[in-house]
Amino acid sequence: MLAVRLATAAILIPILVVVLWAGGPLLVVAVGLITLLAAGEVANLLRRAGLPVSTPVVALLAVLSVLDAAYAPFGSSWAVQGWIVLLVLLAMLLTLRKQDMREAVHSMIGTIFGALYAGLLAYLLRIPLTVASDAAQGPLVELLDPGRAWLLVLVLGVWAYDSAAYVTGRLWGRGRFFAHISPNKTWSGTIGGSVAAVLACAGHGLLIGRPLEAAGLGLLIAVAAPVGDLVESVLKRAAGVKDSGQLIPGHGGMLDRVDSFVTAAPAAWLYLAFLGLV
């Protein structure tokens, strides 16, 4: 299993490098595709958990969130937002056909929650497109613009947290918490992941002239990333499955790979906005 995971990572990491390097439309397409796949898996989990959600509406609303983020630098994306409103209304109207009122309410709640949840991945695009031009400087900015540089810091910080939390949790599995959701979560893993996230972000922060701000992002990741992981665990436990899908060999579904970003990406954008870097 480890060999499969490493082989898959060896393929996916170069793809990420190319996407970040190219930016522009390729980045929009990549985030849109990730969001679409994750939204489909979210809808499937909710349906298996007993909520009769509309997969097309969940997927379309989530992707429209990405398009809304893509339009953000160019002013109000009123057309995209109009479609979002129409689809939310459609989700409500579809429930009126149901004879069971409890089922109707569950359908509305599940569909709208699923779309909002998966749609948070749009912040992976909002960060590189809205970060200010003076938000970073240094050698990394010479290769990428400030927005993509901050996105890279976020991605590496989340990866550092997840990897270190897994390793330290396996080696020193002490102090279990949230065992009713995920029995493998430990305080030792959380501490190891947090230290790794701060160090990874601060180290790359030196390359963009913002080491202290980047270290702060690492601390935020240490809080936000495990929340995303635990929320997905809730969905999987409610659905009675181990993985969100079988898309990526050795890694499960798309949502299994990006669950931490569902919460970490919007938290990172809000953090950068608070610092005046957006």
Image (tube, rainbow, N blue to C red):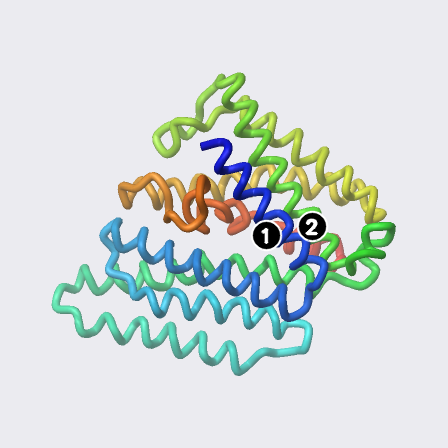
Name the amino acid type tagged 1. Answer: Ala
182 up-or-down from 208: above or below: above
Task: Report the residue at 16% width, 69% height from top.
Answer: 98
Q: Quadrant of the C terminus?
A: bottom right
Write the residue at 63% across / 66% down: 26
Q: Which mark is residue 152?
A: 2
Q: Is residue 233 above or below residue 48?
A: above
Q: Amino acid at mark 2?
A: Leu
| Residue 33 in the figure: left or right of residue 113 | right
Measuring 51% from the left and 51% from the top, which residue is drawn there? Answer: 262
Q: Position of residue 44 (x, y in %)?
A: 31, 55
Residue at which label 1 appears? 265
Extreme residue toward the left, this view: 99
Query: Where does residue 219 sit, x and y in percent of width and height?
Result: 66, 37
Disc ID at residue 108: none
Quarter holding the N terminus is top left
Mark 2 / mark 1, whichever is N-terminal: 2
Mark 2 closeness class: few <14, some 14–19, many ≥20 residues within 10 Å: many
Residue depth check, mark 2 versus mark 1: number of the one nearer the observer: 2
- Asked if labels 1 and 2 touch by Cβ distance under 8 angstroms, the answer is no
Callout 1: SS? helix
- Residue lying at 66% horizontally and 47% vertically, measured from the top left: 154
Is residue 108 or residue 195 the one in the foreground?
Answer: 195
* SS under mark 2: helix
Q: Is residue 154 above or below residue 53?
A: above
Marks 2/1: CA–CA distance: 11 Å
Looking at the image, residue 151 lies above or below residue 92: above
